[in-house]
């Protein structure tokens, strides 16, 4: 059979040239879809060794793409880490170093930079970041916005319509509210509480096993949502022309997870699939933080590096090269408004982790955890559970862990003299990072000043200045 030659004249007459050109353009400009979980215990995913809940849709991304084993959030709270994801800035630099805190109004997010590369930037589901001027996402209905809603119903019709009508490549953030508390979504009866494999930082009693089944039901619901997005990309013909990323966000709302600097809170799943560039079944141990995702996406689109951000592109690692983008990953926690002040800072490389508790004399309190049935499973449990509760509330000034031999950070090596040099080095790194960030430490862990309070403070300062000036003039006149 003779080869068929392409004739552009015939293509024009048949009306298919625009379709061909459109298809070629789509192939040249891949889309981006980032799925973000909410409070996920990443170790429960099958691809990360989980035994309790099947996660076939999430695992498929790992099987057909790359799995990162050293991805870390810089803060284990939803609002700050999403601000870092969208801006490429550490929490202090973005202005969002506490939960439910508005970011600085003079910074920019990915919503400003990706359009410069010809990309539409969409989001569906959980929002959380403010102000709108910094995060002007094109919001698309479909996924639940309220993370504490009793349901997490979703639909993809609006997303499908938008994708099919897109004239430019798009970057879509799908922000699930699963598995965020109150754990009312899914089917807990699908899990046998007696057969659960629990992490060593969790209590092992009947009440907690029942609660954990509810949590696993939401992990399963999350996996089903990922499956729906996969199907959507298939149906729209965009699956293989899309960089699909899955992120675990921070850890779960159990003591030791969310709102801490332990790895149960900061370690995050990160998976990516893009068959044109990513080899199926790849695993990367390159050290990555959430701030690095923004510059990597800019790099992926062919855009120029953004000098104003702090993250570093790990695109070579995404595409299979063993190229490090950073040596150290940093962590921060300020506890107000989630409880009483308890500032924490941390730094880690691939193996060692140093945590500095800046006010170790204080007891750690977190209102959501410690006012729940979960906490009673700790304080009313066996000796191990009570030990974990004590560890949660009372912490030393310095914690140092070998996460290779002690992945759950249960053996504090801070007093081991053979690590003294390493501890001193990492302590200096934290102090240097804080200085660079403008991080003043414990004095920053206070209630945020509301606009009303700021106005009152301004008026008080003006009155004091006016009074002082009047006294000075009077004194001068008398003299």
Image (cartoon, rainbow, N blue to C red):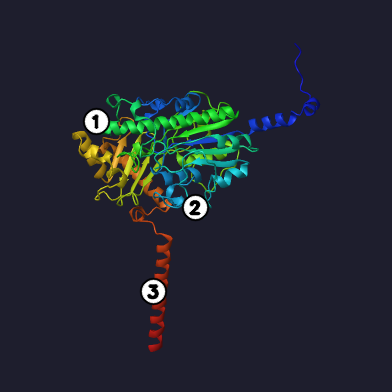
Seen as rendered, the residue at the extreme left is 383
The answer to whether the residue labelled 2 contacts the one labelled 1, judged by CB atoms less than 8 Å apart, is: no
State the residue in front, 14 or 242.
14
Q: Position of residue 271 (x, y in %)?
A: 47, 31
Kindly identify the residue that appears in the image at 50 percent across and 30 percent down: 228
Q: Position of residue 284 (x, y in %)?
A: 46, 29
State the residue in front, 24 or 310.
24
Query: In the rendered picture of this protein, how many numbered marks are placed on residues?
Result: 3
Kindly identify the residue that appears in the image at 41 percent across and 88 percent down: 477
Q: Which mark is residue 131?
A: 2
Q: Position of residue 468 (x, y in %)?
A: 39, 77
**Which residue lies under the disc numbered 1?**
206
**Which residue lies under the disc numbered 3?**
464
Query: Label 3: how many residues lie within 10 Å, few (<14), some (14-19) or many (20+)?
Result: few
The answer to whether the residue labelled 3 contacts the one labelled 2, judged by CB atoms less than 8 Å apart, is: no
Q: CA separation, marks 2 and 1?
A: 44 Å
Q: Relative to 340, is 270 on the left or the right?
A: right
Q: Which mark is residue 273?
A: none
- Whichever of callouts 2 and 1 sits on the residue coming sooner in the sequence is 2
**Mark whose residue sits in front, 2 or 1:** 1
Q: Is residue 157 above or below residue 132?
A: above
């Amino acid at each position: 059979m003779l080869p068929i030659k392409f004739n552009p004249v015939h293509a024009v007459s048949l009306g298919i040239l625009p379709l061909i050109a459109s298809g070629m353009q789509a192939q040249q400009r891949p889309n981006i879809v980032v799925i973000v979980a909410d409070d996920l215990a990443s170790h429960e995913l099958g691809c990360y060794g989980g035994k309790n809940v099947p996660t076939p849709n999430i695992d498929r991304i790992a099987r057909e793409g790359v799995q990162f084993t050293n991805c870390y959030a810089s803060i284990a709270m939803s609002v700050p880490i999403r601000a870092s994801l969208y801006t490429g800035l550490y929490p202090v630099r973005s202005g969002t170093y506490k939960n439910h805190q508005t970011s600085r109004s003079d910074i920019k997010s990915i919503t400003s930079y990706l359009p410069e590369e010809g990309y539409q930037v969409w989001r569906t589901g959980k929002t959380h970041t403010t102000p709108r001027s910094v995060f002007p996402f094109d919001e698309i209905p479909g996924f639940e916005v309220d993370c504490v809603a009793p349901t997490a119903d979703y639909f993809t019709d609006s997303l499908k319509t938008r994708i099919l009508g897109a004239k430019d490549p798009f970057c879509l953030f799908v922000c699930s509210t699963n598995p965020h508390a109150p754990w009312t979504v899914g089917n807990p009866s699908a899990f046998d509480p007696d057969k659960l494999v629990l992490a060593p930082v969790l209590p092992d009693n009947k009440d907690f096993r029942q609660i954990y089944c509810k949590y696993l039901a939401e992990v399963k619901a999350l996996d089903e949502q990922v499956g729906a997005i996969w199907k959507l990309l298939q149906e729209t013909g965009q699956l293989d022309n899309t960089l699909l990323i899955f992120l675990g966000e921070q850890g779960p709302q159990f003591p030791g997870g969310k709102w801490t600097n332990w790895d149960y809170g900061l370690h995050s799943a990160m998976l990516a699939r893009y068959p044109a560039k990513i080899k199926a079944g790849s695993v990367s141990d390159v050290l990555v933080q959430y701030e690095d995702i923004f510059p990597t996406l800019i790099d992926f689109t062919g855009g120029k590096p953004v000098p104003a951000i702090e993250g570093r592109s790990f695109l070579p690692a995404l595409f299979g090269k063993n190229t490090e983008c950073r040596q150290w990953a940093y962590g921060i926690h300020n506890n107000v408004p989630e409880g009483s002040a308890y500032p924490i800072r941390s730094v880690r490389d691939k193996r060692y982790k140093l945590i500095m508790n800046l006010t170790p004399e204080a007891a750690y309190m977190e209102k959501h955890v410690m006012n729940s049935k979960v906490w009673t499973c700790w304080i009313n449990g066996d000796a191990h559970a009570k030990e974990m509760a004590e560890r949660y509330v009372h912490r030393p000034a310095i914690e140092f862990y070998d996460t290779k031999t002690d992945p759950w950070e249960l053996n504090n090596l801070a007093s081991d003299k053979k690590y003294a040099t390493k501890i001193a080095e990492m302590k200096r790194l934290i102090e240097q990072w804080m200085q660079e960030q403008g991080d003043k430490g414990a004095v920053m862990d206070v209630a945020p000043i509301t606009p009303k309070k700021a106005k009152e403070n301004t008026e008080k300062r003006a009155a004091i200045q006016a009074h002082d000036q009047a006294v000075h003039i009077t004194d001068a006149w008398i003299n």
